Amino acid sequence: MNRNSFLAKSCQFIRVAALEISGLRPGLKRKAKTTRPDLTKAEAPATGPGSEKYQRILDAAVEVIAEHGYFSSPVSAIAKRAGVADGTIYLYFKSKDDVLRTAIDSTFDKFHRQVEEEFKTLHGPREQLEYIAQVHLESHAVNRSMAVLMQTEVRQSAKFIAEFSHHHLVKYIQVVREVVRRGQQEGIFRRDVSDGVVAHCMFGAIDELLSSAVFTGRVYDSKATAAQVIDVLLSGIQAR
Amino acid sequence: MNRNSFLAKSCQFIRVAALEISGLRPGLKRKAKTTRPDLTKAEAPATGPGSEKYQRILDAAVEVIAEHGYFSSPVSAIAKRAGVADGTIYLYFKSKDDVLRTAIDSTFDKFHRQVEEEFKTLHGPREQLEYIAQVHLESHAVNRSMAVLMQTEVRQSAKFIAEFSHHHLVKYIQVVREVVRRGQQEGIFRRDVSDGVVAHCMFGAIDELLSSAVFTGRVYDSKATAAQVIDVLLSGIQAR
DNA sequence: GGGGTAAATGAATCGCAATTCATTCTTGGC
DNA sequence: GCCAAGAATGAATTGCGATTCATTTACCCC
């Protein structure tokens, strides 16, 4: 058996077909004529991180890789889904690795920025933990493909993924630990359990809920579920 | 960059060298002469699941895949680690997939048998949950490579892995849910949280602790950690 | 010690897929 | 309309790696 025989080979034509119809395939696009002239590298450069094609490739990569996994997703499949030629991807990214890395990085960055922003107005350990849990659980609804990717590829042992994505996870845990520690100092959380253990428990519990939702395709009410998880966890760690 | 450039190419010679020295390499083995005659297919058939070589290949596969990941582990690397020729692997297994599948299956089976056995004498929801948590956390110490494998490959999106390993996870969750439900009926656990949410939280929390231990290489006291996790969880779900 | 059987070997096959690059298209200025 | 310059293309290159199979080796029985 060769290594791709377990790949579902279909399903991709749908989106490509959609692109064809909407006239976004290169060589067919005509309507974009007005978008470039008026903004001179201030907004959307032709090439580079800001361009529309750059984003399209990233999105396509996330979708394809979520469906088939990194190693079972040929660059050609990503290119096809994005509606560009294989070689075009290398005008925007250094390598196949680089596409995945970029996608994951930007998602984590967005998460951290969001949390950081909210923390400015949201004090109180309990509320902060609730907020994190909720955003984490909501990621499913925000971008299902990305959620799948996070559940599957981020834990890969492939060195290049493991190394850089580890930083992001550590950062998440770090944030939760600090909140927990502060709660302990303020006397609202019990002090006889390690903040590290609590942080990992929280991350793990939420991640597993998300994971199960992702794999079974089940949909849930992220607010209600987050509330339950946090309720159990906080009841478990509140000072008596 | 080609797809294996991130592979560490070394480290493998150590075990192979050990095999060479101990004379286990085929063509060098002489001492095994007495082991076969006296047991006529009752104990260790030459080929087949019981044989020593079969097990050696499985172990080698687990180690190599834990180090490099499934898709970055050529069959030739597994063969080398096991001290057999590439082709030999296909005398014992249908394909590369089959080797991994077998390894994972047997580990899960062992876990479930162990839990089932212990449940015969261990009644009481609290004790049962504690036991599961402990065995789960101990898996790290029992076989580190296998623990790494479980953390990395089982969650792969590669269809052939996802499909069959999903059953095992579902079974784990099922067992925990039943214990929780019984606890709720007996009135020791609160009834306003879903048994499913609790089960996923427990699995997720433990799995994440394990995962972090596996990735950071940190060692911990599995009994003490299990106690903390279960303490938090049970405090969180105990009836008030 | 010879012959048959089973096990093991590893070089050769065959197909796939990352990356490159010579060629073609597009565009904006003249 | 014509001409660079920059984008985009996709066929060709290249190398890897799963699997096969003709050949070799080990072992047993007579």
Image (cartoon, coloured by chain):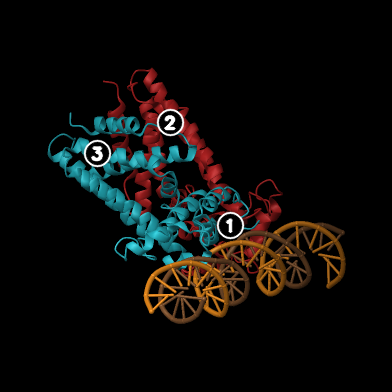
Chain colours: A cyan, B red, C orange, D brown
Residues marked 1 and 3 touching at CB (< 8 Å): no
Label placed on residue B176: 2
- Mark 3 → mark 2, Cα distance in angstroms: 26 Å
Q: Is residue B36 above or below residue D21?
A: above
Left or right of residue A22, residue B29 in this image: right
Q: Is residue A223 visible in the rendered structure shown here?
A: yes
Expressed as whole percent of the image width and height from the top left, the position of residue A231 reads: 28, 30
For mark 1, name the chain: B
- Point out the residue furthest to the left here: A186
- Mark 2 → mark 1, Cα distance in angstroms: 33 Å
Residue A158 picture quarter: bottom left
Expressed as whole percent of the image width and height from the top left, the position of residue A76 reads: 54, 61
> Do tags 3 and 2 sit on the same chain?
no
Q: Nearer the observer, disc 3 or disc 2? A: 3
- Point out the residue furthest to the top here: B186
For mark 2, name the chain: B
Label placed on residue B57: 1
Q: Nearer the observer, disc 2 or disc 1? A: 2
- The residue that mark 3 highlights is A129
Instruction: Label 3: state its secondary structure.
Output: helix
> Do tags 2 and 1 sit on the same chain?
yes
